[in-house]
Image: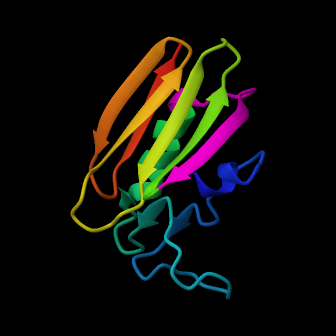
C-alpha cells in the first residue's frame, strides 16, 4: 500500500527466494525476507507472507488498473484503484500491530461499507 499511495506505477518484491538465513545477502536491506524461503538441504520451498500478499493483490488489481485515491485515517491506510472493467478496488491495512481493531467507512456513490479491521490485518473491497 505504501508505494502505491505515493503514486508508484509498479511494485516489486526485492527478494524472490532466500535461504532460511535470508541470504544470500550482498548489502542493502538487512531485514528483508523472500517471497519464498528455500531450504538448501532439502530444496523445500516455504511460502512467506509476501507470497500471499502478492497473490491477493494481483487477484483484484489487474493490469491496466489506475490508482485513483488514498487516505490515512489513524492506523487505517488505504489505496483505491479503478480497474479496466470499471470497478473500484480498495486495499485497506490496519497498521496498528497492537491488539486493537479499528472501524472505518468506505463510500462510493450510493454504496457504503462499514468494517471493523483487526490490528495488522489487510482487507480488499470491490465496489461496482
Residue 100 among magenta residues: no
Q: Is residue 39 left or right of residue 59?
A: left
- Image coordinates of residue 26 in percent, x first then y, are 67, 86
- Image coordinates of residue 29 in percent, x first then y, are 61, 81
Residue at the spot 53% in from the left edge and 28% down from the top edge: 60
Residue at the spot 54% in from the left edge and 52% down from the top edge: 72
Q: Nearer the viewer, residue 122 or 46?
A: 122
| Quadrant of the rendered image containing residue 114 | top left
Q: Is residue 39 left or right of residue 50?
A: left
Query: Can you say which quadrant of the picture contains the C terminus?
Result: top right
Check the image and report above or below for 16 versus 117: below
* Segment tinted magenta in the rendering: 59-73
Q: Is residue 50 left or right of residue 24?
A: left
Residue at the spot 29% in from the left edge and 57% down from the top edge: 119
How many numbered marks are there? 0
Residue at the spot 71% in from the left edge and 33% down from the top edge: 68
- Image coordinates of residue 8 in percent, x first then y, are 76, 51
Q: What colouring does the structure picture have?
A: rainbow
- Image coordinates of residue 125 in percent, x first then y, are 45, 28
Q: Is residue 5 left or right of residue 58?
A: right
Check the image and report above or below for 17 versus 63: below
| Quadrant of the rendered image containing residue 20 | bottom left
Amino acid at each position: 500500500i505504501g508505494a502505491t499511495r505515493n503514486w508508484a506505477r509498479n511494485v516489486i518484491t526485492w527478494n524472490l527466494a532466500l535461504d532460511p538465513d535470508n541470504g544470500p545477502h550482498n548489502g542493502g536491506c538487512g531485514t528483508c525476507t523472500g517471497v519464498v524461503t528455500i531450504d538448501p538441504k532439502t530444496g523445500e520451498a516455504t511460502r512467506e507472507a509476501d507470497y500471499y500478499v502478492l497473490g491477493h493483490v494481483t487477484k483484484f488489481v489487474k493490469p491496466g488498473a489506475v490508482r485513483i485515491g488514498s487516505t490515512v485515517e489513524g492506523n487505517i491506510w488505504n489505496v483505491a484503484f479503478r480497474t479496466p472493467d470499471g470497478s473500484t478496488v480498495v486495499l485497506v491495512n490496519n497498521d496498528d500491530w497492537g491488539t486493537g481493531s479499528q472501524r472505518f467507512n468506505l463510500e462510493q456513490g450510493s454504496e457504503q461499507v462499514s468494517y471493523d479491521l483487526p490490528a495488522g490485518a489487510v482487507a480488499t473491497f470491490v465496489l461496482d
